[in-house]
Image (spheres, rainbow, N blue to C red):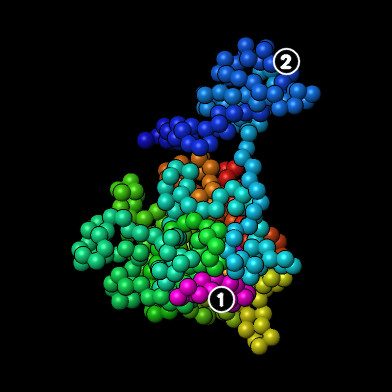
């Protein structure tokens, strides 16, 4: 199916949604009389006055494609300019009681906010504009899939029948309902503290009156136990993600999962990812990247330059990773009085994100703080997922056509929109920290 046909189908779909009125309306500043304008444009069925003294009118039509073209050009005969009748939302905050503890989302007095309100005014996550589920894979020690702030956002393998000991979808994994245990080779997902905390940063259910909120209020989280064990198990965990994404593409969404990002809050301190000893790491990131999967990876929780001392995976050279270090609520590279800190690297570490005293979900209905690059990285993974949910039709269609190329375009937007910080100057590729609002806004206008 061509891109043009897909765009036409999306336009038709949007025309029958709750946004019908807005999608078939255009604001125009007239240079002729209203009747002359209507005579010139039979596709416009009605002109509603907005501010007659300014010659501003609302042009209403049922021919959405015509208005789309006019909106993009910004001109119509008989009008000085045209503009979209954009949706305007309240700049509200979620009602989750522990939201006040989440300084990265703008707690009073925090310099380090990632500017979420501008992003959430566009989308709070969920499916993309094509109606496709957006999935973030958490490679960790497991996730409490029954946590009240996570259960609603856990990925569910709809092609698998639970607990029947049969590989119903033929993906090579039996009863993989929420993900896979690459360590034990079964579907048991442990309720791990670290992994549950990471998952909540990416996608704790927002505005549900419970606990905290994630970067995405709505998304799908795939849980995979495969971290802090050994390289083979990490690669098996990644391979599960890869197979699910390939199956999703091959079956046009009937099976598998539309994984767009993995989160890896683990690694090997001081290792040289570009030596033959670690070649498989780059190979796996590159292979996942072919299918549009960005991997958000955490750098070391130590005060050193990874460009000098090395690190796996943040020292890997695959273009499909985004390597992350830890910033605090005053926009400083994290450094502890007791000697702890976060690594840096002008070549090897891409960007900073909040990672200090981060409130998120913990097993058994709990919430609490944790600190580390492990907490910074899911902000980036969450941003990737939210950007897919917020992306324009053009981006979504092009991504489906060429996921490898457009995954890199999405990464570039995250890096290009980073907020510049003196604390990260010459210490990261971007010299900056995640600005979620700017990244989401840019991909929404792609």
Give me the residue at 69% from left, 60% from top. Answer: 419
The quadrant holding residue 55 is top right
Find disc 1 in the rendering and name its residue. Answer: 368
- As for residue 355 lying within the magenta part, the answer is yes
Q: Residue at x 42, y 51 (%)?
A: 133
- Whether residue 263 is visible here, answered yes or no, is no
Residue 32's disc is: 2
- The image quarter in which residue 336 lies: bottom right
Above/below status of 72 relative to 161: above
Q: Is residue 313 left or right of residue 170?
A: right
Image position, residue 235 (x, y; %):
37, 70
Q: Earlier in the sequence, mark 2 or mark 1?
A: 2
Q: Secondary structure at mark 1?
A: strand
Nearer-the-camera pick, 343 or 367 = 367
**Residue 186: quarter of image:** bottom left
Q: Which residues are magenta?
A: 346-371
Quadrant (top left, top right, bottom left, bottom right) of the C terminus: top right
Q: Is residue 391 above or below residue 216?
A: above
Quarter of the image for the N terminus: give it: top left
């Amino acid at each position: 199916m061509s891109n043009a046909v897909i765009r036409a189908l999306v336009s038709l779909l949007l025309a029958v949604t709750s946004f019908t009125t807005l999608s078939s309306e255009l604001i125009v500043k007239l240079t002729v009389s209203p009747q002359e304008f209507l005579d010139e444009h039979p596709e416009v069925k009605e002109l509603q006055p907005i501010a007659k003294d300014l010659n501003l009118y609302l042009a209403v039509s049922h021919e959405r494609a015509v208005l789309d073209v006019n909106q993009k050009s910004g001109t119509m005969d008989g009008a000085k300019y045209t503009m979209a009748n954009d949706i305007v939302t309240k700049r509200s905050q979620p009602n989750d009681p522990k939201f006040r503890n989440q300084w990265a989302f703008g707690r009073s007095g925090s310099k380090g906010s990632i500017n979420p309100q501008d992003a959430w005014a566009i989308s709070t996550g969920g499916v993309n504009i094509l109606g496709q589920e957006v999935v973030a894979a958490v490679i960790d020690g497991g996730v409490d899939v029954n946590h009240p702030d996570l259960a609603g956002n856990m990925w569910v393998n709809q092609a698998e029948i639970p607990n029947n000991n049969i590989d119903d979808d033929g993906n090579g994994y039996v009863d993989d309902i929420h993900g896979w245990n690459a360590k034990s080779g079964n579907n048991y997902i442990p309720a791990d503290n670290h992994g549950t905390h990471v998952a909540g940063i990416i996608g704790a259910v927002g505005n549900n009156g419970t606990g905290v909120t994630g970067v995405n209020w709505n998304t799908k989280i795939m849980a995979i136990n495969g971290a802090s064990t050994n390289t083979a198990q990490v690669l098996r965990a990644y391979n599960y993600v890869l197979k699910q994404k390939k199956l999703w593409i091959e079956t046009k969404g009937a099976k598998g999962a539309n994984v767009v990002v993995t989160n890896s809050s683990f690694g090997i301190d001081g290792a040289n990812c570009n030596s033959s000893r670690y070649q498989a790491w780059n190979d796996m990131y590159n292979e996942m990247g072919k299918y549009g999967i960005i991997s958000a990876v955490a750098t070391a929780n130590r005060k050193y330059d990874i460009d000098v001392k090395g690190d796996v995976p943040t020292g890997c050279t695959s273009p499909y990773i985004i390597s992350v270090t830890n910033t605090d609520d005053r926009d400083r590279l994290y450094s502890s009085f007791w000697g702890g800190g976060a690594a840096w690297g002008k070549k090897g570490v891409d960007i900073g994100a909040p990672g200090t005293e981060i409130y998120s979900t913990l097993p058994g209905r709990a919430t609490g703080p944790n600190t580390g690059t492990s907490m910074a990285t899911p902000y980036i993974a969450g941003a990737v997922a939210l950007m897919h949910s917020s992306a324009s039709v053009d981006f979504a269609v092009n991504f489906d056509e060429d996921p490898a190329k457009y995954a890199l375009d999405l990464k570039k937007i995250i890096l290009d929109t980073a907020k510049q910080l003196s604390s990260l100057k010459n210490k990261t590729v971007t010299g900056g920290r995640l600005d979620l609002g700017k990244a989401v806004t840019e991909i929404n206008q792609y």
